Image (spheres, grey):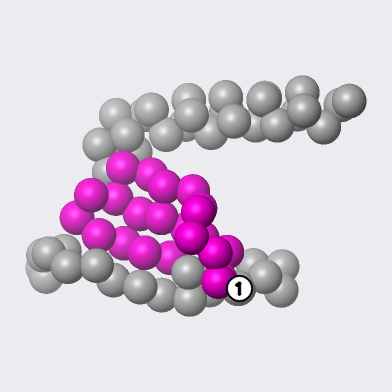
Amino acid sequence: MTPLDKPLRRELTVDEQRYTLLIDPDGLKLTLRGHRQGVALAWKDLVNGDAALSSALRASVEGVEHKD
């Protein structure tokens, strides 16, 4: 198996929006093409389940913001 020792970038399209996916030894980051900020996820958070908790919390907060 090849170790992940340097960043790997790939482009993907979701609902006609272009994104850049960066995978590196620390985790992964998904950003809208041409932007700097995006969604980052550390490998340790994914492995221990914190990613699911974070996602659920973000969804609940965004749901409250959109109800105004």
Q: Which residue is mark 1?
A: 18
Residue nearest the observer in this picture, 66 or 53: 66
On the image, the x and y values in percent for residue 28 come to 35, 54
Identity of the amino acid at label 1? Arg
Residue nearest the observer in this picture, 67 or 51: 67
44 with respect to 14 (left or right): left
| Majority secondary structure of magenta residues | strand
Residue at point 11%, 70% (across, down): 2
Query: Of helix, strand and loop, which one carries label 1?
Result: strand
Task: Give the quadrant of residue 46.
Answer: top left
Residue at point 49%, 48% (across, down): 39
The N terminus, quarter of image: bottom left
Residue at point 65%, 31% (across, down): 59
Magenta stretch containing residue 40, yes or no?
Answer: yes
- Crowding near pointer 1: few (<14 within 10 Å), some, many (20+)? some
Task: Give the quadrant of residue 60.
Answer: top right
On the image, the x and y values in percent for residue 5 come to 12, 64
Q: Is residue 60 above or below residue 8?
A: above
Q: How many marks?
A: 1
Magenta stretch containing residue 10, yes or no?
Answer: no
67 with respect to 40 (left or right): right
On the image, the x and y values in percent for residue 44 come to 25, 36
Q: Which residues are magenta?
A: 21-42
35 with respect to 59 (left or right): left
Residue nearest the observer in this picture, 39 or 56: 39
Furthest-right residue in view? 68
Q: Is residue 52 above or below residue 13?
A: above
